[in-house]
């Protein structure tokens, strides 16, 4: 099955329970004709599989699996734990989650579950065990998806008594004694000193604001809880069906769960991507953001990933988004392949007639008759299959590293410093600058080795600990080029400010500067000039006092006019760049251009704005994907050594795939 899995290229999220039995054969045939080999099914079908407690009915699903299997289509099953049925909630109402106002949520959507609730866990174990026992030997079932988008639809996650008690256990394991917790959190402030762990609240709404240390530990606890909830299911599946693989549909930079930790127990990572965004988010995600999400998911395990849900039509609920333009579905398909997807499933096969998502369009429209979307994707599948055959399973690492830390993300969410400062958005701004130079990025975490990368970009290292400082210092001493920014080294890992030396703390020597003063740019931007180019700086201004560093940009307004905003310092065999502010994108791109030159990294080529170039290696050849995300045709220079059959303009939302045969200086056969 493992080998077979490697041959799966395309598929769809399929809900046979939404359609009459008479339609299933036709669907399966049409899927095969389109070039699909896999479906994901059943992730919301708890009631269909267990209509009443203890009475399981898998006959309908067996039949669907068999019908699809006969057409050469294999099945991934979702555990249905994102949708506990009404009979279960009626029996155990404590399963319903409680929000930050202390209100219990009602039954009716999905994810109406508390993940620490022991009665829920018992029922979860029952349904997962029953499914696993039933499908362990099914020749068509090759893998499992745990739950669905864990952490989604939860808002604050659950703040019920059961979760609060679980939080106490988590805190006790971390701090051992209540005295230690009081000390670390600084509970002497506002008389919040606790005598026992049992007194500690879940962060429900209070008249003012909670202690930031409590809030950070709560976010860590919630992330661990999600992983633990999933882990129970993983354990059962591993035991009963060791030959079937396990994944989860992650959601790019979604923040409720530390995906690096979660990824450790998955066989492969999967992603859900809707480039037009959800409901009201016009005009959808910019292409660099989509690219960044996919690079991130690929980096979760540093392995190629599956696209578990790829937008296949207009998205919408009460309001309906615009139709993907001709070419866009193919463009998104190729973009995901370019960024490391080996298999792509489209959400969903056919647009549902009823329920909350009746306007969230699938490949087929409501009437089930293949139209423009089916035809476009069918053609994309035909063209991309030979490419996937060569590149599938071959990993292409990003050229530069970005450090990604959930702790930093959460701490900045708790106290953003500036109303519009967000860790993920800051990461995306830097990512965008690399993207504009067509340089690929690998995301890494603190535990990873930094040494493999010539450049490490680490924005907003707001929380700091000695181990991380050591890693930064030895990376730079050894020749690495490190990029640090404002708000580095402000707090310790328990979210408490540090006072033993000026910012950025022990890293000052490597930065070659100290921050003597700073300005929150809450009411206005400031001017700055970077090597003679005028621009704007936003959100924050560190006023640098240089010791050994050289200035690269200076402020041009305010009381710190003329003082450095960006600096570079040689340290050991490497260099540290420090950006004390958020320069506007034009300046950031200039800066990154200089940085790349210094590091000897060249991008895959120059392209007009909105056109990206990404490379993936294969067994026989390298492939360069040119992706035009604009509605205008564009022209790019043929990349050196690469060939494509077509030349001339790339049409609106068009793609071109260039190939360079290994071992030969020039291109081989044609691709697209
Ligand atoms: C998510 C879910 C799907 C579906 C789609 C469309 O990504 O995983 O079940 O709800 O969004 O809204
Ligand atoms: Zn709860």
Image (spheres, grey):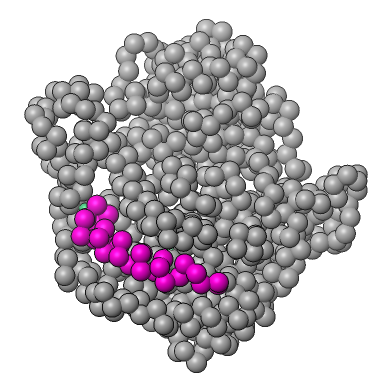
Q: Which residues are magenta?
A: 111-140
Tell me where residue 655 appears, x and y as whole percent: 73, 60
Left or right placement of residue 210 versus residue 435 in this view: left
Specify the quadrant of the image occupied by residue 135: bottom left
Q: Which is more toward the observer, 27 or 330?
A: 27
Picture residue at 15% right of the left edge, 27% below the top: 178
Q: Which is more toward the observer, 468 or 524?
A: 468
Left or right placement of residue 660 versus residue 561 in this view: right
Tell me where residue 79 appears, x and y as whole percent: 39, 65
Instruction: Give the quarter of the figure containing the N terminus.
Output: bottom right
Picture residue at 47% right of the left edge, 19% below the top: 469
* Viewer can see residue 304: yes
Q: How many marks?
A: 0
Vertical comparison of 546 with 542: above or below: above
Picture residue at 11% right of the left edge, 27% below the top: 193
Specify the quadrant of the image occupied by residue 456: top right
Vertical comparison of 314 with 159: above or below: below
Left or right placement of residue 376 versus residue 131 in this view: right
Vertical comparison of 133 with 254: above or below: below
Vertical comparison of 584 with 608: above or below: above
Instruction: Give the quarter of the figure containing the C terminus.
Output: bottom right
Tell me where residue 646 appears, x and y as whole percent: 85, 62
Q: Residue furthest bottom?
A: 22
Picture residue at 26% right of the left edge, 64% below the top: 123
Q: Residue furthest top?
A: 547
Q: Which is more toward the observer, 9 or 287?
A: 9
Tell me where residue 242 appears, x and y as whole percent: 49, 57
The majority secondary structure of the magenta stretch comes to helix
């Amino acid at each position: 099955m493992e080998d077979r899995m490697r041959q799966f290229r395309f598929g769809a999220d399929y809900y046979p329970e939404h359609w009459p039995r008479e339609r299933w054969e036709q669907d399966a045939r049409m899927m095969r004709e389109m070039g699909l080999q896999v479906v994901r099914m059943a992730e919301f079908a708890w009631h269909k599989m267990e209509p009443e407690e203890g009475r399981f009915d898998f006959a309908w699903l067996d039949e669907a699996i068999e019908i699809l299997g006969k057409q050469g289509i294999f099945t991934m099953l979702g555990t249905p734990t994102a949708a506990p049925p009404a009979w279960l909630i009626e029996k155990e109402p404590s399963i319903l989650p409680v929000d930050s106002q202390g209100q219990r949520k009602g039954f009716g959507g999905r994810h109406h579950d508390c993940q620490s609730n022991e009665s829920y866990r018992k029922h979860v174990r029952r349904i997962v065990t029953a499914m696993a026992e039933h499908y362990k030997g099914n020749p068509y079932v090759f893998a499992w998806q745990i739950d669905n988008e864990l952490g989604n639809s939860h808002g604050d996650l659950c703040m019920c008594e059961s979760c609060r008690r679980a939080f106490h256990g988590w805190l006790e394991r971390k701090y051992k004694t209540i005295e230690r917790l009081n000390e670390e959190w600084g509970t002497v402030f506002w008389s919040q000193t606790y005598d026992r762990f049992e007194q500690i609240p879940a962060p429900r709404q209070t008249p003012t604001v909670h202690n930031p240390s409590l809030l950070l530990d709560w976010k860590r606890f919630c992330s661990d809880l999600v992983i633990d909830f999933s882990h129970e299911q993983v354990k059962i599946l591993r035991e009963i069906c060791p030959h079937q693989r396990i994944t989860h549909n992650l959601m790019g930079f979604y923040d409720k769960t530390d995906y690096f930790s979660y990824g450790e127990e998955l066989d492969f990572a999967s992603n859900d991507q809707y480039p037009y965004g959800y409901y009201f988010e016009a005009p959808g995600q910019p292409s660099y953001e989509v690219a960044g999400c996919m690079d991130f998911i690929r980096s979760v395990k540093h392995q190629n990933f599956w696209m578990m849900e790829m937008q296949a039509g207009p998205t919408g609920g009460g309001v309906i988004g615009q139709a993907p333009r001709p070419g866009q579905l193919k463009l998104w398909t190729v973009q995901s392949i370019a960024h490391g997807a080996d298999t792509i499933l489209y959400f969903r096969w056919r647009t549902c007639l009823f329920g909350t998502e009746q306007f969230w369009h699938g490949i087929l429209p409501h009437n089930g008759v293949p139209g423009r979307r089916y035809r476009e994707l069918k053609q994309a599948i035909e063209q991309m299959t030979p490419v996937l055959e060569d590149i599938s399973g071959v990993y292409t690492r990003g050229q530069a590293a970005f450090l990604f830390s959930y702790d930093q993300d959460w701490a900045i969410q708790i106290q953003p410093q500036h109303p519009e400062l967000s860790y993920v958005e800051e990461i995306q701004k830097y990512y965008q600058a690399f993207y504009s130079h067509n340089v690929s990025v690998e995301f890494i975490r603190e535990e990873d080795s930094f040494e493999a990368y010539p450049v490490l970009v680490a924005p907003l290292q707001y929380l700091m600990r000695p181990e991380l400082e050591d890693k930064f210092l030895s990376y730079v001493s050894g020749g690495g080029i490190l990029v640090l920014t404002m708000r580095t080294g402000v707090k310790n890992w328990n979210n408490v400010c540090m006072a033993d030396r000026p910012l950025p703390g022990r890293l000052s020597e490597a930065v070659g500067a100290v921050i003597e003063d700073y300005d929150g740019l809450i009411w206005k931007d400031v001017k700055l000039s970077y090597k003679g180019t005028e621009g704007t700086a936003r959100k924050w201004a560190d006023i640098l006092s240089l010791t050994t560093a050289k200035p690269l940009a200076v402020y041009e307004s305010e009381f710190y006019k003329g003082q450095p905003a960006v600096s570079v310092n040689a340290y050991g065999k490497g260099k540290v760049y420090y950006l004390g502010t958020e320069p506007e994108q034009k300046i950031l791109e200039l800066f990154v251009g200089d940085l790349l030159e210094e590091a000897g990294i060249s991008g895959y080529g120059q392209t007009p704005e909105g056109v990206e170039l990404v490379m993936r290696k294969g067994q026989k050849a390298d492939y360069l994907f040119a992706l035009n995300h604009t509605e205008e045709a564009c022209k790019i220079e043929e990349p050196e050594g690469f060939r494509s059959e077509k030349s001339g303009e790339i049409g609106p939302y068009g793609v071109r795939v260039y190939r360079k045969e290994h071992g030969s200086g020039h291109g081989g056969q044609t691709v697209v």
